[in-house]
Image: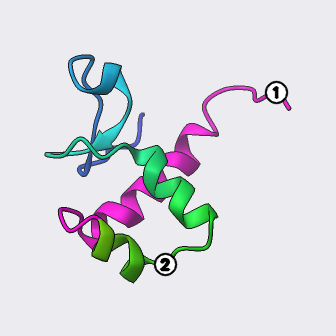
């Protein structure tokens, strides 16, 4: 059974189907990249005021979940 994400939207009409935070055009990869660069939730929320802490948490959970879906190549 696929995991349900209430804060993530994937729609071919929005950013070519890239996963975004529901109700925005902020892609999940932006949040993941900022976190990987060492930015904390407070910084992300200040720079993306349309986001909530739950959006950030779910974006990271979504990224983790998607890496389990297929074989990755390095």
CA–CA distance in space, label 1 to label 2: 29 Å
Question: Which of pointers 1 and 2 indicates the residue nearer the eye?
Answer: 2
**Residue 28: percent from the left, percent from the top?**
41, 46
- Residue that extends furthest to the right in the rendered view of this protein: 74
The answer to whether 35 is drawn above or below residue 73 in the figure is below
- Does residue 33 belong to the magenta stretch? no
**Residue 67: percent from the left, percent from the top?**
63, 39
- Label 2 neighbour load within 10 Å: few <14, some 14-19, many 20+: few
Q: Which mark is residue 73?
A: 1
- Residue that extends furthest to the bottom in the rendered view of this protein: 42
Which residue does the numbered mark 2 point to in the structure image?
40
The magenta segment: 48-74
The answer to whether 35 is drawn above or below residue 3 in the figure is below
Q: Which badge, 1 or 2, is on the more N-terminal residue?
A: 2
- Does residue 66 belong to the magenta stretch? yes
Residue drawn at (40%, 42%) of the image: 3
Quadrant holding the N terminus? top left
Residue drawn at (52%, 62%) of the image: 34
């Amino acid at each position: 059974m696929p995991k349900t994400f209430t804060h993530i939207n994937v729609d071919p009409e929005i950013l070519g189907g890239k996963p975004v935070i529901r109700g925005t055009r902020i892609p999940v990869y932006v949040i993941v990249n900022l976190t990987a660069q060492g930015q904390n939730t407070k910084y992300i929320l200040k720079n993306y005021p349309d986001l909530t802490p739950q959006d950030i948490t779910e974006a990271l959970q979504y990224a983790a979940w998607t890496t389990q879906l297929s074989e990755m190549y390095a």
